[in-house]
Image: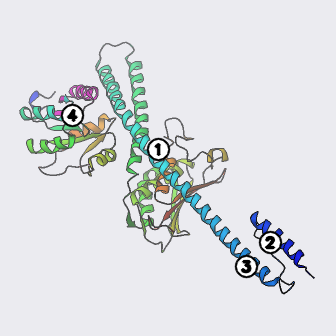
Amino acid sequence: VSGPATRRRVVIVDDEREFAATLARRLELRGYEATAFTTAEEALAAAGSAPPDVVLLDLRLPGMSGMELLMTLRQLVPGVRVVLLTGHLDHEARIEGLRLDSFPYLMKPVVMDQLLAKLEAEPPGRGEAGDR
Amino acid sequence: MTTRREFLIALTSALEQVAEGDYSIRLDIGGEEEFEPVAAAFNAMQVRLRDTVSSLELAIKNLHQKQRELVEAEKLASLGRVAAGVAHEINNPLAVMNEKAGLLQDLLGLAVECPGKEEYLALVRGISIQVRRCGAITHTLLGYVRRVDLTVEPFDVNHCVREVAEDLEHLSREKGVTVGLELGVELPVVRSDKIQLEQVVLNLVKNAIEAVPPGGAVRVATAPGTEGTALITVSDDGPGISPAHLAHLFEPFFTTKEKGQGTGLGLFISRGIMKRLGGDLQVASTPGKGTVFTVAVPLRYGVLS
């Protein structure tokens, strides 16, 4: 059993509260320190005092967009790993007008084994786009 | 000998027939010298009228055909947008259901004293499986949105087919099905959307591998087609498709696969893609002998042949 010092801190940002909260609970059961937020602003405010290791991020958020949060977080917490949660990457990319396939992502509904693999993958170096 | 009166009667009757739309009637020129120029002019007018009317009829027919195609393409595109919108709205609650069922499974797994635990676990796993099944449908439909936007680039159709065959090698080997390639030499370079064409071919070859029994054969051939197209044919020696099924093959949600095995969207979307690329997807099948799918890709997207 890993102690609190080694628990990886995972932040989930998704405006679907039930989704974020339930997923956080499931990650807690697997030994992670997981917190759920429904807006980018809340997540950003919390990230200052407790920098996360990994952020699971839905791009479609009310207010500050997921993409803005992603950019800001990377400056605030260098080396933070961001995994996008999406219904369909191309769909979101079209909306954001960006090519997002250079970011690690997971399609919703999430398969837990795939999520755990993403969480355990080596974090990318500073400034890199990350893996797929 | 033709009298003036007789000639005028013949001319009147002929003109009445022209008014009715009959341009085949001709006047006899070999009569009186006086009537000859009139008869010749009438006959020349008839030839000209017939030619003009038939070219107009052809133009109208082509116009109707193009209009039908445009309406069909627009219908598919808007249907795709609606379907993708619905899929997106359903996908989020689906993701919540997935986590709730997952948490229930987690908690049941951790429970020490829980009579009937195995049965509950089996039930909750069943829910997760059905959620995944819905997810396959929503993801396919969401993929349709992307197919509305095209990326046109020059590429080699044979290269495209080889990549698909490589992608499906594990599947064919696992099932003991041979996938033979007969790639046409001197195929012109195609300017179209490579990724979307690959998706169509992948879908067809995958279907063919699934349709034949172990030991069966699938053949993918490429050849130049007519009117500035390249043809890709995917044939198999499987059980074939009955005429009753054939009629519904390209309809959305039509599937003959076992429940939960297919979304019934593959061929519908594939044909939608080919129409979008200005090409076509056709099928021919003989029950007991096999099925042939023919993909026609215009060599240059956006250039009308």
Q: Which residue is mark 1?
A: B79
State whether discs 4 and 1 lie on one chain: no
- Residue A96: percent from the left, percent from the top? 26, 47
Disc 3: which chain? B
As measured in the structure, the alpha-carbon distance from the residue carrying label 3 to the one carrying label 2 is: 11 Å
As measured in the structure, the alpha-carbon distance from the residue carrying label 3 to the one carrying label 4 is: 81 Å
State whether discs 1 and 2 lie on one chain: yes
As measured in the structure, the alpha-carbon distance from the residue carrying label 1 to the one carrying label 3 is: 52 Å
Q: Which residue is mark 4?
A: A13
Q: Which residue is mark 3?
A: B44
Q: Badges 4 and 2: C-beta atoms under 8 Å apart?
A: no
Q: Earlier in the sequence, mark 1 or mark 2?
A: 2
Callout 3: helix, strand or loop?
helix
Please state, as top left, top right, bottom left or bottom right, where the N terminus of chain B lies in the image.
Answer: bottom right
Q: Residues within 10 Å of mark 3 (few under 14, many from 20)?
A: few
In reply to whether residue B126 is colored magenta, the answer given is no
Disc 2: which chain? B
Q: Is residue B250 above or below residue B223?
A: above
Mark closer to the observer (1, 3)? 3
As measured in the structure, the alpha-carbon distance from the residue carrying label 1 to the one carrying label 2 is: 51 Å
Q: Which residue is mark 2?
A: B25
Residue that appears at 79% across and 66% down: B17
Callout 4: helix, strand or loop?
strand
Q: Which residues are magenta?
A: A9-35
Task: Evaluate whether residue A73 shows in this view.
Answer: yes
As measured in the structure, the alpha-carbon distance from the residue carrying label 4 to the one carrying label 2 is: 82 Å
Q: Residue furthest front?
A: B5
Q: Is residue A106 above or below residue B203?
A: above
Choose between A127 and B240: the one closer to the eye.
Answer: A127
In-image side of B288 versus B169 (left or right): right
